[in-house]
Amino acid sequence: MSPRRETRAATKLLNATGNAAASVIAARMQAFSDPATLLSPWHQSEARRMTTEKLDAVTDGIQAAGMALAMLPARLLMIGARPASWTPGGWIAACNDVAELWFGVGNAALRPARNTAVSNRRRLARRASNNTSA
């Protein structure tokens, strides 16, 4: 796997997560800003949902990163065991491969948060469109 593949995946993950998180924050700020509906059942369930989803995403991210970290020593040994890794040109490629492994750990940790943010954006957008059409 090319190091560029993991860095591109990291860029896409960060962009998707940032865009979705900004949309979710804006939608929730708009929904919570109406004082007439303050502490409604929807607000209470949304506040509960926010905390549980964050905790679930954190635990899933920690688990995924832990699994990627558990495989890291074996993968590092495989990179170091290649004879080409000990040549001047191969050393640079080996360093790039090691960087790719670390990007993979970060990507594994970020995917659950991205999935949660994207699904929340979709759900809140549906709710906003249903409220405006009603």
Image (tube, helix red, strand yellow):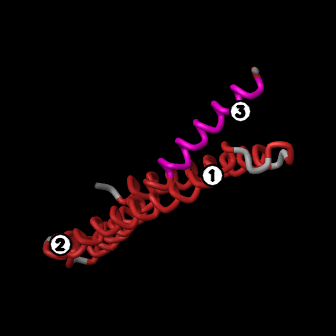
Return the x and y of residue 62 as percentages of the image width and height. Answer: 38, 67
Return the x and y of residue 68 as percentages of the image width and height. Answer: 29, 65
67 to the left or right of 35: left
Q: Which residue is drawn at 65% across and 50% down?
A: 44
**Do tag 2 and tag 1 residues touch (Cβ < 8 Å)?**
no
The magenta stretch is 114-132
Q: Residue at x 28, y 75 (%)?
A: 91
Q: Residue at x 67, y 44 (%)?
A: 41
Determine which residue is flagged by label 3. 128
What residue type is disc 3 on? Ala
Front residue (pair 61, 2): 61
Circle 1 SS class:
helix
Determine which residue is flagged by label 2. 74
34 to the left or right of 14: right
Front residue (pair 95, 130): 130
| Secondary structure mostly seen in the magenta stretch | helix
Q: Which dot, 3 or 1, sits closer to the camera?
A: 3
State which tag comes first along the sequence, 3 or 2.
2
Q: Dot 2: few (<14), some (14–19), or many (≥20) neighbours within 10 Å?
A: few
Distance Cα–Cα, label 2 vs label 1: 35 Å
Quarter assignment of residue 65: bottom left
Determine which residue is flagged by label 1. 21
Return the x and y of residue 122 as percentages of the image width and height. Answer: 58, 36
What residue type is disc 1 on? Ala
